[in-house]
Amino acid sequence: MPADADNKITLIPDGKSFEAVRRFGDDLTKQLSCIPKAANRVSVAIDEIYSNIVKYSGADIAEIEYKIADGKVYIMFVDNGAEYNPLAAKEPDITLSAEERKIGGLGIFAVRKLTEDMEYKYEGNKNILKLAIALE
Amino acid sequence: MTIDKNIQNENATLAVSGRLDTTTAPELEAVLDEVLPKAKELIFNLENLEYISSAGLRVILKAQKVMNTQGSMKLTGVNDSIMEVFDITGFLDILTIE
């Protein structure tokens, strides 16, 4: 496997890979340190999407790649696991009381709210998810 | 993530700093399993918390549910970024933030 560029990481999505993803995310958020809200959105998005890949996709390889352009951070997640379209996920009811609350689906919901744009396609047996996060 | 515990009788303050995410949330859950049974007042000091993801929200929600039945719970030092996550997920309505 060729070495990844600085803005890309290729992973075997298991429990041990989170540390590498955290460092990769840190390298990105360091570049956004003057925009704490954007840095936070990026951190949340990476944690939510990547942990879903690890827990549910059954993928044996995953990639995360980002670029910063036009006042936005674009992050792309690719995995070869089961087809899963987060845009089709049912939204949780966030008006319920603490007692009635269920936590499932909240992560993807948070990412949808924190991103300006989210695109999904399933192509060549791969899930390809692109997020755009505004730098503001 | 680091958790500083300050427990005096039935009052517990947990200062959580760093990241509360998929990898660290289980650590907070373990501390809460130990603290919650005796707590009447629980305070989370989040002054040095960098970010929270849904794994962290799940643990906070679990604590809130327990404290609703046996005392009170509040969060202090919540920064704007973390407030945004509480806001979009509807957590502002179920938490007490000072």
Image (cartoon, grey):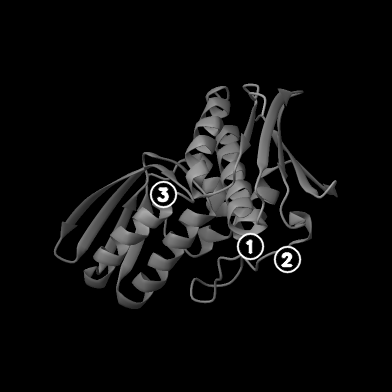
- Could you say whether the residue bearing mark 2 is in a helix, strand or loop? loop
C-beta proximity under 8 Å, tags 3 and 2: no
The amino acid marked with disc number 3 is Thr
Which residue in the structure is indicated by mark 2? A90
| Percent coordinates x, y for residue B94 in the rendering | 49, 65
**Residue at disc 3, secondary structure:** loop
Q: Which mark is residue B24?
A: 3
Label 1–label 2 contact, CB within 8 A: yes
Left or right: B40 as drawn, with respect to B74: left
Distance from the alpha carbon under mark 3 to that under mark 2: 26 Å
Query: Measured along the vertical axis of the image, is residue A20 above or below residue B76?
Result: above
Task: Point out residue B1 in the picture as x, y percentages from the top left corner.
Answer: 36, 43
Above or below residue A69? Residue B86 is below
Q: Residues within 10 Å of mark 2 (few under 14, many from 20)?
A: few
Farthest residue, direction left: B9
Q: Amino acid at mark 2?
A: Lys
Which residue is disc 1 drawn over?
A: A105
Residue at position x 61%, y 65% from top?
A: A94
